[in-house]
Image: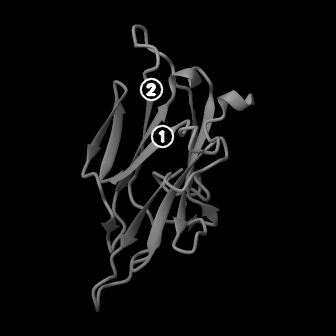
Amino acid sequence: MDPADDLTEPVTPNRPPTVRVTLLLADSAQVADGKLFILGGGITAIGPRPQPMGVAIRIEVPWDRANVPHLWRIDLLDEDGHPLMVRDKPLVVHGRFEAGRPAGLKPGTPLSVPLAINFPAIPVTPGRSYTWQLSIDGATQVDWRQSFHVRAAPPGAPPTPPPPAAGPDDPGRLPGLD
C-alpha cells in the first residue's frame, strides 16, 4: 500500500487527521441513499437482558484519498479489553469500503462513507461494560470506539438465557450475528 493511501497516519500539530470517524450506538441504524438513518441513537446503557443494537459509523475520507479500497473491522471487547466470545469465536464484523467522488462535488469536499450494522441481540453479561472498537486497514485510534454498560439484573430476576443452540445445518453460528 502506498503511504499516501494510509488513512491512519499519525496526527501531528502540522498534519491534521487523515480520516475522521463517528460511531454511535442505537436501537437500529440503516444506510440509504448515502445517508445514515438512526433510531434511538446515543445508547450508553442497555439491558439487563439482551436487546437489539445497531452500530452507526460515518467515515469521513479526505478528497485526495478517494477511490482507494480499505478494509474495516469492528470488534466487541469486554471491560478487560478481551474480545466478546460467542460460541468460542470473537464477535467481529468486517468489510471493505472505497470512497468515490460523486460528479459535480466541489474539489476538496470530504467524502462520507456511512455504515450500519445491526444485531438482533448480543449475549452480554449484566453489570459489565463493553466497547465497540473500529479499525481501518489494521490500525485504530482511541476515538474510534464507543462503549456501553449493561445494567445489573434486579434482585430475584431470572438469569439471562444463553445464546440459542446451533442447528444441524448451522454449526457454531449465532442467528443474526454470522
Q: Residue at x 34, y 72 (%)?
A: 49
Name the image quarter holding residue 35: top left
Say which of 108 and 5 sits in front. Answer: 108
Q: Nearer the viewer, residue 97 or 65?
A: 65
In the drawing, does residue 33 fall left or right of residue 17? left
Q: Is residue 41 left or right of residue 87?
A: left
What residue sits 31% from the left and 59% below the top?
Answer: 43
Looking at the picture, does residue 82 appear above or below residue 69? below
Please give the label number shown on residue 110: 2
**Residue at the extreme front:** 14
* Amino acid type shown at disc 1: Arg
> Residue beneath label 1, please?
20
x, y percent for residue 149 = 38, 71
Give the structural element (helix, strand or loop) at label 2.
Answer: loop
Above or below residue 151? Residue 134 is above
Occupied quadrant, residue 87: bottom right
Q: Position of residue 154 (x, y in %)?
A: 27, 86
Q: Give the vertical position of 104 relative to 19 (above or below).
A: above
* Residue under the point 53% across and 70% down: 78
Q: Residues within 10 Å of mark 1 (few under 14, many from 20)?
A: some
* In front of the other: 50 or 7: 7
Quarter of the image for the N terminus: give it: top right
- Mark 1 or mark 2: which comes first in sequence? 1
